[in-house]
Amino acid sequence: MRGRSRGLLPLVGSLVPASAATVRTAAPVRTTSPVRPPGTASPVPSGVALPGPGPVARPPSRRRAGRRWETLCWAAYAVFALLLCLRTTVAPHQVWGACATVGYGLAALVARLAARPWGPASAAVAVVGSVLVPLVFLVADGARQLEVTVVERSGRLLLDSGTPYVPDPAQLPDYNPYLPGMALFGLPRAVLGDVPLADARLWFALVSLGAMGLAAALGRGPRRGSPSSVPGTGPQSTARPLLRLATAPAVALPLAVGGVDLPVVALMCLALVLAGRGGPVAAGLALGAATSLKWTAWPLLPVGLALLAVTTGRRAAVRAGATAVTLAVLAVLPVALADPRAFTEHVLLFPLGEGGTGSPATSPLPGHLLATHVPGGFALAVAALVLSAVAVAGSLVTRPPRTTVAAADRLALGLGIAMCLIPATRFGYVVYPLVLLGWFRLGPAGRWRPVDRGTEAHRISLFTAKPLED
């Protein structure tokens, strides 16, 4: 069969004479017993040296082109960081811009001098300069943006009063637009006090990278009930896409300054992977954890359940939905009942721009422009938002996603439309569609998934959704 014969190509290629310019072989392997190479009728005598299989080397022109594109990529990141540093008035963003400019610049230099393009060395340099150095500096200095202060205060309020919301918010720093689960990131500060380990930014980064790493590891493993795992899936194949993800400015910036959206989208990715693997309870727990942090995670629920219904069955989707809703209700309902008026003001009215204080989320996107400059524009923006939600929900019924990457694409589309139409929105929300679109395409690892229930299992790629012939 074609799928099996393809697996012999590296060995056949290794038997080509060494004069072939495009084949790179490993050190000779001396056999101690007769072997029968593919395609031969008689064994090779003992002691004969056979060349080991090796990868096909890229032509020099392709290597030069790859290095050039990688260098331009890091240079573009450095230019973005420098412009942000020069134009922003937010002190943590200035620190990030200065550090990231140097980090990306050094990564461009490493890429230019590297023997192979897109190696781990340049990405590691970029991560150190754009994530590690600014994060350590900001934590040691104590400078933080408003979101971090709000989350740490909400953890202290949750311990003291049972609700993370200020009863009578009077000014912008008093508002907490996040769901009660977000207050958990502020508990270390409330319990440990003013120590670096208690900084909420560290916990944002740990949960984000941990969830994404777990999603990568699970995505490269076999699906429940499938044959053994795919060869070549180990810690290195898990760490490389995680390293690449962390270098993107849309991810490196919130990792360093403490953006609250990154742990939300990381849990969303983990929930999609678990749903694609067919684990209803685990997927439900991840769905519930994400939806208890922020309203922006709630579109994940119908998309994840639709994927689970296709891959495993409706009964599994019902179990996952019940688990997710139960966890979200347990996290939100007690707080909402403790002070309904404060919950409504902080979590419902303020994110829509209808609270006592205007929301700082005022990026000039269609929803905000409608609500600001058109009579009755707020109602128009909300109506357009509802219509788009109905359209995406209808697509889940008529054409449900059958792979994890298809579900991530559908969710990214829905969130992208919603973030353009919400009356109070900001450009920082672009991290959701960017991560959802890019994360599942960072590696070509395959796995098993039944195309339809009751049919023969076919092996497909989690990240590319491209069927592999058997």
Image: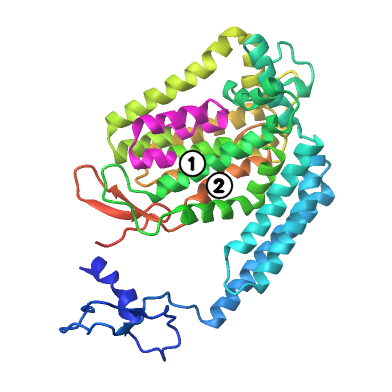
Q: Nearer the viewer, residue 139 or 340?
A: 139
Q: Nearer the viewer, residue 38 or 56?
A: 38
Query: Which is more N-terminal, label 2 or label 1?
Result: 1
Picture residue at 70% right of the left edge, 58% below the top: 77
Tell me if residue 279 is in the magenta stretch: yes
> Going by the picture, which residue comes out furthest to the left?
41
Residue density around tag 2, few if under 14, some if 14–19, many if 20 or more, within 10 Å: many
Main secondary structure type of the part rendered in magenta: helix
Q: Residue 254, image x and y in percent?
A: 67, 42
Which residue corresponds to mark 2? 435
Tell me if residue 367 is in the magenta stretch: no
Q: Residue 257, image x and y in percent?
A: 72, 40
Picture residue at 44% right of the left edge, 37% below the top: 271
Q: Quadrant of the C terminus?
A: bottom left
> Going by the picture, which residue comes out furthest to the bottom?
19
Mark 1: secondary structure? helix
Which residue corresponds to mark 1? 269
Residue 73 visible to the viewer: yes
The answer to whether 173 is drawn above or below residue 92 in the figure is above
The answer to whether the residues at label 1 and label 2 have Cβ atoms under 8 Å apart is yes
User: What segment is highlighted magenta in the picture?
Assistant: 272-301
The answer to whether 267 is drawn above or below residue 128 in the figure is above
Q: Quadrant of the N terminus?
A: bottom left
Callout 1 amino acid: Cys
Residue 331 horizontal side relative to residue 372, left or right: left
